[in-house]
Image: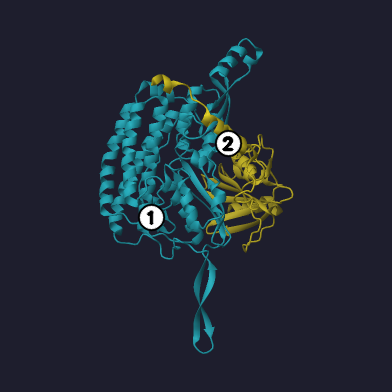
Amino acid sequence: MSVVEILKEKFGAAILGEETTADQIGIYVSREVLPQVMRFLHDELDFKHLADLCGVDYLGWKGKRKKAERFEVVYNLYSLSRRELLRIKVPVPESDPRVPSVTSIWRVANWFERECYDLLGIRFEGHPDLRRLLMPENWSGHPLRKDYPLEPEEEWKDYAELREKARELSRYEWGDRRVRGG
Amino acid sequence: MAPTLELYTRKIGHPEWEEPFVVNMGPQHPSTHGVLRLYLELDGETVVRCDPRIGYLHRGLEKLSENMTYTQAMVLTDRLDYISSAANNTGYCLAVEKLLGLEVPRRARLLRTIVCEMARISSHLLWLATHALDIGAMTVFLYCFRDREWLLDIYEKICGARLTVSYPRIGGVRLDFTPEIIDELYQFTEEFPTRITDYETLIDVNRIWLRRTKGIAVVPPEKALNMGLTGPSLRGSGVPYDVRKFRPYDAYDEVEFEVPVGKNGDTYDRYRVRMEEMRQANRIIRQCLDKLAQTEGEPVVAEGAPDLLMPEKKKAPRAVPHPKKGFMVKGEEVPVVPEGEVYVSIEAPKGELGYYIVSDGSGKPWRVRVRAPSFVHISAIPEMVKGHMVADIIAVIGTLDVVLGECDR
């Protein structure tokens, strides 16, 4: 029995659908049951390795596969004993970008979720420490969203201050070693 | 200078002094291997809390590649882990090839395996050099750089670049090896095992080395997997997970090699695993070179591989019925890369390097996600250093083998 069949049998309507590319299978799961599905996959089906977790923004998507919501959070799981790769996808609406956190199942999810929050603005509920990771803490906007411009018109507000500081330091006289040394 | 001194004198004897002492290690610290900043709370010299701050090298590679064609974005992957760029290119090419459904010719697969293993050796050599230097062994550093230089010279002969090689391409490799490169690689594989033995005699029984690495940052196997460690850092804990064995790509299914694993999961075991891996990599290169002779003169790029310029749409001929001529051929615009999404990972020298690419059928990737091993490994630092001394943080950063270009992307 394949993993998809097992999941469908156990969770029924919470499995929203599936999608295949090449030999890889992706399963859509509704976010309400995500913690239960993940716990089941981790404990019962032995998917101990969370290879990747990321978000995708589908704003302005023109592909043939229809997307129900703007965002998707994608979990790539791997099972060492089954030697099987599985992709779990969770649609997230734009109006309410929240997903339950899986940090209690896989510790590795901690930074993945922080990064996803930082770059796409999806909030993970139950995350112990949801702060920005790659961007500065007072950054506004989420860079990986499709409506975020490649070159923003405004510069980061702390940048002017930093530049001024660097200019000051470049004028600073670094000791008198040169004078003494001759 | 002066203000710090004042701060110390003012604080002594005050209740504030009892609070955990905060130290910022980095981002310009020589042993953080890049621009990593660790926010440390110390009790004496013991680490109470560690909070890595990253992002100093964030260039927005994922955002940039959304605005480029697939071949243009490949050049960005060189800049991820700039020490083993050939492996990064290969991973990206494998992902796009999977989207395209391309079958890479055998000779190209062998050549890619060779450059990947060369990347592994040169990455491990740099790791050994800096790790030993951090811990206090200067001699190893010089010897390792000598051998790494040899490999970089071979890279230069192969494709003209030393670090950012961009040698693999979508559908194969850019150039074939010349006979003199093969001769030099034979010479390298002949000599390299004795060099590894040399390094081992330098540090294997060195008392300082053993005291600094044995029992430091022990990670049990289940915890290592749960924290997402991959590559040698995971295998040091005894989990034999290697992408080359579990999901073979390129020519790894036709060569023989072993996956070394550790027992105790400490820094010393991870060191042993990497040393053994270099031997295995050498073995793989040797076997691939032997197999190259069988495929002499075969093509190195798959038929139907996209042009290097890669237009966004291509004209595909289609037979259309015609009342008089029987049929006529019409050109029709079809997407270069079909719609779909793939997750493809390879065993990069640092660990599992994964690419998750979403294609919408246009000439540009909709989303390129890089699962970088260094990113995950840095997230494991707080757990690994808790309760250790400050000096051991250096050993932990070294043993995880992180590169910040890959972590920040």
Residue A155 falls in which quadrant of the image? top right
Q: Is residue B266 visible to the viewer in this orientation of the structure?
A: no
The amino acid type, in three-letter code, at marker 2 is: Arg
Looking at this view, is B49 or A91 the one in front? B49
Residue B208 falls in which quadrant of the image? top left
Q: The yellow chain is which one?
A: A
CA gap, disc 1 to disc 2? 49 Å
Is B191 left, or right, of B22 in this rendering? left
Judged from the image, the secondary structure of the residue bearing numbered disc 2 is helix
Looking at this view, is B347 or A20 the one in front? B347
What is the display colour for chain B?
cyan
For label 1, the crowd category at 10 Å Cα-Cα, with few meaning under 14, some 14 to 19 and many 20 or more, is many
Q: Give the residue number, with chain letter if any, for mark 2.
A: A163
Judged from the image, the secondary structure of the residue bearing numbered disc 1 is helix
Chain ID at mark 1? B
For label 2, the crowd category at 10 Å Cα-Cα, with few meaning under 14, some 14 to 19 and many 20 or more, is few
Q: Is residue A56 placed above or below B392 in the rendered structure?
A: below
Chain ID at mark 2? A
Is B284 left, or right, of B401 in this rendering? left
Q: Which residue is drawn at 37% across and 35% down?
A: B275
Looking at this view, is A163 or B263 the one in front? A163
Looking at this view, is B268 or A93 the one in front? A93
Q: Is residue B231 visible to the viewer in this orientation of the structure?
A: yes
Q: How many labels does the image show?
A: 2
The amino acid type, in three-letter code, at marker 1 is: Arg
Tag shown at residue B177: none
Q: Give the residue number, with chain letter if any, for mark 1.
A: B109
Name the outermost residue toward the top: B13
Q: Where is residue A168 in the image (x, y as percent from the top left)?
A: 56, 31
Q: Is residue B93 placed above or below A163 in the rendered structure?
A: below
Q: Is residue B181 placed above or below B127 in the rendered structure?
A: below
